[in-house]
Amino acid sequence: MKPLTETSLRMDKREIIYRHAGAVRLTHWINALVLLVLLMSGLQIFNAHSALYFGSKSVFDDPVMSMSAVRSPDGPKGITTLFGYRFDTTGVFGLGGDAETGYQRRGFPWAVTLPGYRSLAMGRHWHFFFAWLFLINGLIYLIWSFASGHMRRDLLPSGKELGHIGGSIAEHARFRFPKGEEAKRYNVLQKLSYLIVALILLPLMLLTGLAMSPGMDAAFPVLLDIFGGRQSARTIHFISASLIVIFVAVHIFMVLVSGLWNNLRSMITGRYVIDEAEEKS
Amino acid sequence: MSGGLDRRGFLARGLAVTSAAMFGGCDGLSQQPWVRRVLAWEETLTRVAQRALLSPKALAREYSEADLSKDFKANGSINPQDPDYRALAANDFADWRLAVGGLVGAPLSLSLADLRAMPSRTQITRHDCVEGWSCIGKWKGVPLSALLERAKMKPDARYIVFYCADTLGRSTGDKYYESIGLEDAFHPQTILAYEMNDQVLTIPHGAPLRVRIERQLGYKMAKYIMRIEAVDSLDGIHGGRGGFWEDRGYAWYAGI
């Protein structure tokens, strides 16, 4: 009897909550698609000049980072430099292909660019079209989040939560995720990472993108001052994009390990199953 | 319940279409005329937005001598082999004439000496290439507005077209050309430069004359200019899209 009772009790205690509002779900998926297109078309644009600089101008023999193809006694090589350090990245960055099919000079592999062949013109059309979608979608999300209280209620961490951040990190490192009442809210690490992405990194992508526009620079010269020059803005655009890629990788990993279907369902239909806290069952 | 299933079916189809588009279908999509047409809306949106934000007289930032690039990159044509151009270059462009025509009341034919005798503007500006790099150079030349006023441009003119001496499309034999709207043509920093960094303009940078359009990207700034024409439409000029690179898919408005 006892096990049965416990099972039925568990069933009773399984609670389905409405986790994500329609506006969050819709803007989330639009953003996911838009960011993927922006990333891939952005790498196409990067490949047109696969080097980054700091300051207003490009000092071609002093890049912060570069990907290039060079000749060597053993045949052509792909070389990536970072702050003056050289790495052989043949086949990955700088040089693709092989002796049989022919070598290609390029930064990132064409497999991860949009289009998947060299076309700066089309890459720019994809990038700027989706940049407009990104702007509109992002504004809808931000305005809704602030107006509805989502930002304050769901994302702003309390002082108490911030005080217990060490514990939360330790729990995450052991892949132990909140259950019961605690699972109804974002935990402090989620709150901070979502806030950093939504309020810092994504707006930074837009602003550094605009700072690369000679037209916008004439309209708002302050864009150049904020980022320390057009080439700095381009480098920050790249770094910020890289941080977003890292965020997305961790985000997807956490979705996988903390209940793929429950998480996916909640972001599609809004419904999220809360399992009873272990200690009480 | 059936609503739920329909929605699930819709989501599944959406996901399938999206992933097909993302992985494998995108190259196909990039070739589709309707996709190209839709994506090209970004240019219109960007142009309208920037024209609204950008006052006609807002200047591009000007830099100091200390900021000048020591390695200003020359791009596109850097040494035209067109026989007519070689002949002019062999004579240090003493026989070169700039023709100003089209929708003007007083067509002009000006030598370099004529241009140098006109009022000039000198500016140190950043040159942003569509590829992503930037160089800073000092340019001296005649404001295009002064030339258009002297030629008595007619009110029905809407674009200024620059015809160049260099053949860049080797396979097609197309000569370089470019065009701009009147907002940029009459902008104070839009000059026809004959000097760069206090030296006579060199061949890699467009000798004897190139245009500077400081609020747009490098490909708008035609080099090796032979003829300037005021027109009311870009139809029928080469590919009809207003420029050499525009005919090859790049945006006509290059403010971003």
Image (cartoon, coloured by chain):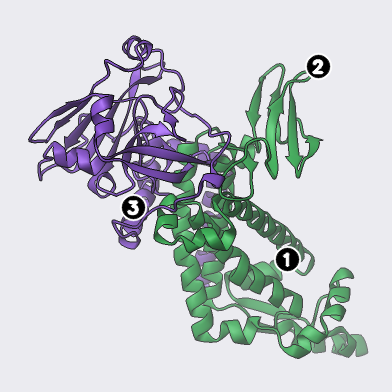
Which is more toward the observer, B27 or A39? Answer: A39
What colour denotes chain A? green
Q: Where's residue B74, x and y in %?
A: 50, 29
In the rendered structure, the answer to whether residue A109 lies left or right of residue A124 reads: right
Nearest to the observer: residue A131 or residue B120 = B120
Q: Which amino acid does the dot numbered 3 rest on? A: Arg
Tag 2: residue type? Pro
Q: Kindly indicate the quadrant of the structure image that contains residue B171.
A: top left
Q: Amino acid at mark 1?
A: Val
Q: Secondary structure at mark 2?
A: loop
Query: Residue A202 in the image: x percent, y percent?
Result: 58, 64
**B185 left or right of B231?**
right
**Residue A255 - label:** 1
Q: Quadrant of the C terminus of chain A?
A: bottom right
- Label 1 SS: helix
Q: Which residue is mark 3?
A: B47
